[in-house]
Image: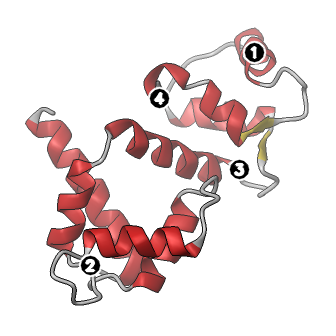
Amino acid sequence: MSNKAVNNFETKCKKFFDAANGGEPLTPGALCRVIRKACPSFKGEDSEIAAMFFDVDKDHDSLISWEEFTKAMFAKDPKEITRAELEETFKDVDKDGSGKLSRAEIGDLIKSLEIKVSDEGLTSLMEESDPNGDGVDIQEFLAAFKDILS
């Protein structure tokens, strides 16, 4: 990773860490809450999160410090991190909380990214991303980014 990418990634990690427990070391419960919030498609059991916790808690004090957290995050596959970011983006864009992105929500996302797309282009994008026409769900959203996730 370039220095800029490392700094950007570290900033995102710090934001995640601070949101999880106000910047204080993470407890098992805080880690569980934050993983479920950040990765809504995670279907694992709390025991799996507990196992992750104890893998990261290298000094065995039942807390994950900022240092332990960053070391673990930098050891992760960047594609796994990207997926979590995309899931968080999906939740942010899904303004009505329906679990599906409407044409308007996709349009708002495109505008926020300062991408110029015509109405016809947006229609084409929706048809490609949402073949069944019921709104773009999380799996369809992630599939649109398959090239960076595979």
Looking at the picture, tell me which residue is in the foreground, 100 or 61: 61
- Please tell me which residue is depicted at 54% across the width and 26% down the height of the picture: 145
What residue did someone put label 3 on?
A: 94
Which of 106 and 114 lies nearest the eye of the viewer? 106
**Amino acid type for the residue under numbered disc 3:** Asp
* Labels 1, 2: front one: 2
Disc 1 on helix, strand or loop?
helix
Residue at screen point 53% across, 37% down: 112
Q: Nearer the viewer, mark 4 or mark 1?
A: 4
The disc label shown at residue 64, or none: 2
Tag 3, which secondary structure? loop
State the separation of the CA atoms marked 4 and 1.
18 Å
Q: Sequence order check: which comes first, mark 4 or mark 2?
A: 2
Numbered label attached to residue 18: none
Marked residue nearer the N-terminal end (4 or 1): 1
First in sequence: mark 1 vs mark 3: 3
> Going 57% across and 47% down the picture, which residue do you hit?
87
Query: Does label 4 or label 3 sit earlier along the sequence?
Result: 3
Which dot marks residue 149?
Answer: 4
Above or below, 23 against 67 in this view is: below
